[in-house]
Amino acid sequence: MSLKALALGLLATSVLTGAAAAQDEQIRIGVSIPAATHGFMGGLNWHAAEAEKRLEAAHPNIDLIIVTADGPEDQASDLEDLVSVQQIDALVVLPFESEPLTEPVRAVKDTGAFITVVDRGLTDPTIQDVYVSGNNTEMGENSAEYMMTRLGEGDNIVILRGIPTVLDTERFDAFMAKIEGSGINVLDDEFANWNRDDGFEVMQDFLSRFPDIDGVWAQDDDITLGVVEAIRQAGREDEMFVVGGAGMKEIVRGVMEGDPLVPVDVLYPPAQIATAMDVTVAHFTSNGPVRGEYILGSPLITQENAEQFYFPDSPF
Amino acid sequence: MSLKALALGLLATSVLTGAAAAQDEQIRIGVSIPAATHGFMGGLNWHAAEAEKRLEAAHPNIDLIIVTADGPEDQASDLEDLVSVQQIDALVVLPFESEPLTEPVRAVKDTGAFITVVDRGLTDPTIQDVYVSGNNTEMGENSAEYMMTRLGEGDNIVILRGIPTVLDTERFDAFMAKIEGSGINVLDDEFANWNRDDGFEVMQDFLSRFPDIDGVWAQDDDITLGVVEAIRQAGREDEMFVVGGAGMKEIVRGVMEGDPLVPVDVLYPPAQIATAMDVTVAHFTSNGPVRGEYILGSPLITQENAEQFYFPDSPF
């Protein structure tokens, strides 16, 4: 084949491909998430943007439109715009709160859009086509199982809880059920509101009251940062270890490097938004069905597997 | 740009793309499924092949290797070959039977491979990284809900069950719980072993014994074919309607065309193998986590939505 023939052949292919792509139905998918107001949501926003780049590069006929909200009312207004201005074919939504977003999401559904709900559910789950979420029960169980590999009869732990919610109760109940009969003593549990400052204060209190602590279940990586600070200030880092949760990159890096104070983490992935975007795109591109419930696992992150959970460019 | 420059430019691009692809880590994913010995498995085999074509075209560094087995021993031997000959990085497996495949799949896991289990579970679920399955409870519930939109106090139905298994019991119990209090009478239920001939015989028996039948829950499309034949032979097609299940293309086409005898179907998709292949590929290509349980919905297939469940080229 001459170069000219080759060039014309390649051009013809390009033109045909372009034409085929232009003929493909253009699909618009709205992604409505809370703004990056704290660590976990920062990670979630970053993963949504990464998934948008990856999916739009792989599927020229897919347009993902990410909008972030500062509160439930703001998010409801975002949803109206996604319908009226963007005319979306599908919606991926992590509701700021369940109750105030239920009717706004139903209104989107009523336009015929495919609905994927992430993490925090709606009060009427029949609205969603797909539900993607982490697994709080497994998170509690896997944390307890790790504790039991390190501690036993007569060892003492303290527990820092999150905010009094269904989610927190699921984690706590699963943890307590799992350690039952292990002989591990729970000295006390207190709420630390999923933040570093409260984690620091609650842990200071525990350290002043209990001279013998072998393990700490902080169940959240923001809390863990405060707990670690309190332990270091007290100079008691050789007496105990801490188990957090989420998969914050600083914590995961410590696990990779073999930090004895925080030797493991338990995943509750902000990247679940990317999974939700993947299955929503698959609804339009795959021969496999996607409707249903996708409950992501909360595996233990150890020194051996930490690398696959480490995203150095993520803010979280 | 001259044609020559253009051709060289395009060639250079191709070479670079090829080189980049060659540098990408090559990922080998084994897909082990039962051979296409009956309708549902025929559909499952077809959907696996479709997904292979689609995923390999989209991801040049992914190699999917589908192997089909005639029985549990054959499948165990397939798994050994996938490890020793193909050196797979991941396995998607629909176990022929749960018990005899559990240790063979564990042996694959022990090589470090990522494991996705489909439909029929293993006796030790801790082996799997992802589980993808249909939802038998929802299948029973959605079938009952449709019945209740058509029938009420004093109406009579008959039920054809599958094979006495956990799966069949889940469907049946969910159906019965849902219709409780509706006033619908269940005249009788009998096993029809998920096949057409038994469906025909059982329905002939029901027709001879019951002069007044308003609805039939056949819960399976193979059974439905036999049921329809028996009703037509008896000339009673104007007296009742039939609800099957799976999404067989002949049944879905009838639903699309408004068949009054089989007005709806309930999905239990053989295409779930494609979903399982999608999430396994996503483990290597997406920033979203995939480990967990993905339980696919069993939506009602109606004349309005039937088109999206109709695959004219599938054997099922």
Image (cartoon, coloured by chain):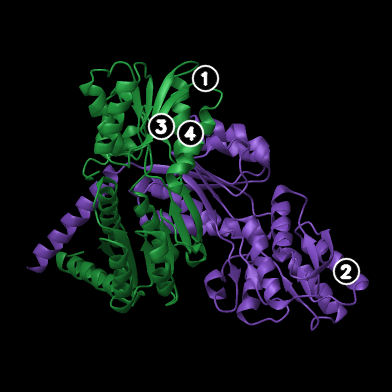
Chain colours: A purple, B green
The Cα–Cα distance between marks 4 and 1, rounded to whole angstroms, is 14 Å
Q: Chain of mark 2?
A: A
In this rendering, which labeled residue sits more in front, label 2 or label 4? 4
Looking at the image, tell me whether mark 4 or mark 3 is earlier in sequence order: 4
Point out the image quarter for the N terminus of chain A.
Answer: bottom left
Residue B28 placement (x, y as % from top left): 33, 71
Is residue B236 in sight in this rendering?
yes
Looking at the rendered structure, the kind of residue marked 4 is: Phe
Residue A189 placement (x, y as % from top left): 83, 61
Q: Secondary structure at mark 4?
A: helix
Which residue lies under the disc numbered 2?
A: A206
> Are the residues at dot 2 and dot 4 in contact (C-beta closer than 8 Å)?
no
Name the residue at 74% across, 73% down: A242
Looking at the rendered structure, the kind of residue marked 3 is: Asp
> Are the residues at dot 4 and dot 3 in contact (C-beta closer than 8 Å)?
no
Which residue lies under the disc numbered 3?
A: B189
Q: Quadrant of residue B8?
A: bottom left
Name the residue at 60% across, 69% down: A300
Residue B183 has which mark?
A: 1
Q: Chain of mark 4?
A: B
> Do the residues indicated by labels 4 and 1 lie within the same chain of the protein?
yes
In the displayed structure, would residue B282 be above or below residue B46?
below
> Do the residues indicated by labels 2 and 4 lie within the same chain of the protein?
no
Residue B28 has which mark?
A: none
> Do the residues indicated by labels 2 and 3 lie within the same chain of the protein?
no
Q: Secondary structure at mark 3?
A: strand
Which residue lies under the disc numbered 4?
A: B175
> Do the residues indicated by labels 2 and 1 lie within the same chain of the protein?
no
Q: Residue furthest left?
A: A1
Q: Secondary structure at mark 2?
A: helix
Is A12 on the left-hand or right-hand side of B93? left
Q: Residue furthest right?
A: A209
